[in-house]
Amino acid sequence: MKSKMKAFVCRGPKQFSLEEVEIGEPEIGEVKLKVLYAGICGSDLSIVHGRNPFASYPLIPGHEFVGEVVESKDASFRAGQLAAVMPVVGCGECESCHLGNVNRCRKVKLYGVHINGGFAEYVLVKAKNLIHFEEPIQPNQAVFSEPLAVGVHANRINGTNQKNSIAIIGGGIIGSVILKVAKVLGAKSITVIDVIAERLERSLLLGAQDVINGSQHNLRELSKNQDYAGKYDSVFDVVGNDETLDIALDLLKPAGKLVLVAVPSGEKRNIDVLKI
């Protein structure tokens, strides 16, 4: 097998190029994947532009990827299997890790942020971070495993059920999977807010009952309108800035639940505490 591969390498903020790098060999407990598909997340762009304080340069980004096992040093995987990656790596020793909450580990690392990720022909991954599909699935569908997991997790935190009226601020991929999971869980009503018409059209196709185009309305004023203010049991903020946070608080019913899906790292948020 060849020893080198092409990879998208970031050597610092706005310092990126397609390079030929060493593939490397898996250690005990690791698997070598041939990357088939990789998704581009907003956080990948923040790494490229130097807005992610956790990025460890030089780095191969990419945390949403799926691949074929070509070599395994772990008995649970064999060559030829299709596998998706759970990108969060905990220390394995702290209380959070023992409880299965690796995302809360104080020493947490992520493929594509701290460890080389999927924007390459091949990648080495710990077997414990791989997900094998029991049922047949196409790679271009399997690559959505990580975004889908975000949607499932967000709805679990919310406790989405048939009594929930929900607003989702941000109708991109993550907003869409939150919407789809909420529909499966039987949410009573779902409103999606975005500034891009195509995203809102997709939201309606996915089952949203109402959409609001922020490019055609003053959202701050609309969120205080009697038709929307205090209307929702739950609001998912998938944008994560001061304006959307303020709007989300206006939309919530008293004792409603706000799920912050997008929170830019290293930035302080201004919150009107009287709304909480």
Image (cartoon, helix red, strand yellow):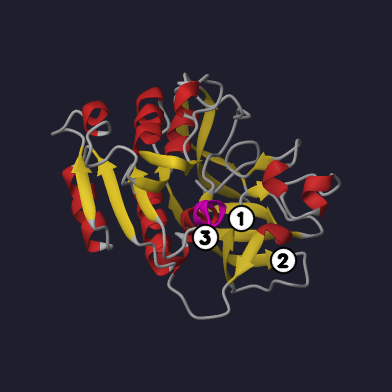
Label 1 with label 3: CB-CB less than 8 Å: no
| Residue underneath mark 1 | 86
The amino acid type, in three-letter code, at marker 2 is Ser
How far from the left and from the top, in percent, is residue 115? 65, 40
Residue 164 sits inside the magenta stretch: no
Task: Kindly identify the residue that appears in the image at 27 percent across and 58 percent down.
Answer: 208
Q: Looking at the rendering, which quadrant does residue 86 occupy?
A: bottom right
Query: Pointer 1: residues within 10 angstroms few (<14), some, or many (20+)?
Result: many
Task: Kindly identify the residue that appears in the image at 13 percent across and 34 percent down.
Answer: 216
Query: Pointer 3: residues within 10 angstroms few (<14), some, or many (20+)?
Result: many
| Residue underneath mark 3 | 66
The amino acid type, in three-letter code, at marker 1 is Met
| Magenta-highlighted residues | 154-159
Regarding residue 17, the answer to whether it shows in the image is yes
Q: Quick one: 128 or 244, which is closer to the camera?
A: 244
Task: Kindly identify the residue that appears in the image at 38 percent across and 35 percent down.
Answer: 248
Label 2 with label 3: CB-CB less than 8 Å: no
How far from the left and from the top, in percent, is residue 266? 56, 21
Tag of residue 263: none
Q: Gap in Å between the C-alphas at discs 2 and 1?
A: 17 Å
The amino acid type, in three-letter code, at marker 3 is Val
Task: Kindly identify the residue that appears in the image at 52 percent across and 19 percent down.
Answer: 268
Secondary structure beneath dot 2 equals: strand
The answer to whether residue 97 is above or below residue 162 is: above
Q: Gap in Å between the C-alphas at discs 1 and 3?
A: 10 Å
Q: Gap in Å between the C-alphas at discs 2 and 3?
A: 15 Å
Q: Looking at the rendering, which quadrant does residue 183 occupy?
A: bottom left
First in residue order: circle 2 vs circle 3: 3
| Residue underneath mark 2 | 72
Label 2 with label 1: CB-CB less than 8 Å: no
How far from the left and from the top, in percent, is residue 199? 24, 48
Secondary structure beneath dot 1 equals: loop
